[in-house]
Image (cartoon, grey):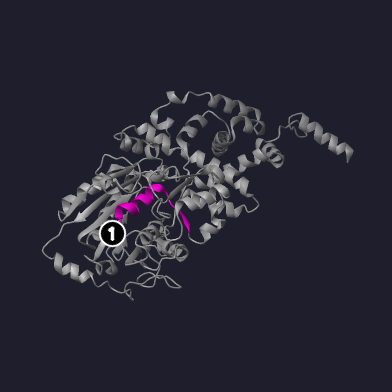
Amino acid sequence: MTSERSSSSARQAQGGRRPGGQQARPGARRAATAGANPVAQRIEQVRSALGEILQWSGPADQVLSRWFRDHPKLGGRDRGTVAEAVYDVLRHLRRYRHVAEGGRGAATRRLAILGLASTLGRDGILPALEADEADWLRRVSAIDQAALPREIRLSIPDWLSEALAIEPDSDSLLAALNRAAPLDIRVNPMKADRETILAELRAGVASEMAEPTPYSPFGIRLQGRPALTRWGRFEDGSIEVQDEGSQLLALLVAPRRGEMVIDFCAGAGGKTLLLGALMRSTGRLYALDVSHTRLARFKPRLARSGLSNVVPVVIANENDARVKRLARKAHRVLVDAPCSGTGTLRRNPDLKWRQSPESVSDLCALQRSILASAARCVAPGGRLVYATCSILRVENEGQVEAFLAAHPEFELLSAPELLADRAGALSLPGPYLKLRPDVHGTDGFFAAVFQRRHGPAAVQVAAAQAELPEPDAEVAGLGDEIEGPDGQPTQDEATGSAPSPGQEDR
């Protein structure tokens, strides 16, 4: 036994040579090293996760969650390191691939090394590398990024670079979208006030990382990732996770007590909950969505919120009979439309690699159809808010111009003026709400506000809307089970398509 151990040690000292003078394969050496070195283990774990995500079979967060379920022995801190490195690679994928071309071995391993070097620091990862990998990392770390072409330096596809070139300071915008986002939460005004929640956060869960958001009177911004979901204030519905930009959408809708309001693309209900709280749980608030699954996830959030005026409704599409029954009856309608999600790249960096001009064109057609259908629900004098989490003009200003040309019965209002007394120091040129991470610290958001002009039938419509329709078999809310209009899964569950990017918590 002693002789065998000595021989093994001697082979390792000679560079891992096997009997007969053969060099040990790099993969075998890495496996042996990974068994003893935590950083080497992280490299292999990040490489493995990237190998699945870069097949682009679905949203990165869902694929990574599935990968974590397949690797249950990873601790919470290890998961955090892997996730941080994976998302760093996705943010800088084009640049990393460009500099990785000069390396040897598996491309995903080189990407994993670059991601961990960024998150752990180069000196923290060098001891876990083989000599040639360490030399390669030092070499690529010395590259002058300013000398790289814009699309590579900012790690952006050509089509998106061209689309954003018309935006002011587009390099600053894209650089901000390549940085990780803080965590924004929103206080439920039905249950708590912001000052109380801030004090409790600073005293315990989030220490000094909590600050009030500058524009939303309900928001708190957290640096880091405190364990909020196990906090009593989250469990009792006093707070919800919601980006500050999304909170401002509810202030643009500005619902009043006793009104009928429609959240036309409710998703998992983040905006709906704030609208209901602003209505003080009076009137009626319809939360419409084509996804059975998303509205099912809304159910526990609604239960925590304490609201009783919300009627969630699964619809087949924007022209569903349930929508037609609400024609010209709603005082306020919010359309947070399915979109490219390019304003959420801080949180969903894979979107810039999964979207394309063709997919954006398809989304624009859907947006036009949804907006036209939602507009039919607006009563004379009522308000319609169109919003996206996109920074592409074709999804934003372009849709507004097309809508106004086709619907002269609507006029455009000034969003900044509507927010003047509600959103702190927010200053915008108007007439739109346009938020950018580099300027406002939020995700990229766009919103336009329309008002239906009063027409000859205004008196009759006003009388009709005074009697709000009761929820019945045709306008079904959430019960113990949720079904689509025909009792079958709705289209997105049947086809397995993903929800609109960024819409889950908005």
The residue drawn where x is 48% and y is 58% is 238
For the C terminus, the quadrant is bottom left
Does residue 458 appear to the left or right of 94 in the view shown? left
The residue drawn where x is 45% and y is 51% is 194
Does residue 339 appear to the left or right of 192 in the view shown? left
Q: Quarter of the image holding residue 438?
A: top left
Give x and y (percent) for residue 302. 44, 64
Report the number of discs: 1
Q: Residue furthest left?
A: 456
Specify whether residue 314 is painted magenta.
Answer: no
The residue drawn where x is 35% and y is 44% is 424
Q: Is residue 98 visible?
A: yes
Q: Is residue 362 visible?
A: no
Give x and y (percent) for residue 202. 54, 47
Specify whether residue 247 is painted magenta.
Answer: yes
Q: Quarter of the image holding residue 299?
A: bottom left
Q: Which residues are magenta?
A: 238-255
Give x and y (percent) for residue 171. 37, 32
Q: Quarter of the image holding residue 489?
A: bottom left
Give x and y (percent) for residue 422. 33, 49
Residue hosting label 1: 333
Q: Nearer the viewer, residue 422 or 385?
A: 422
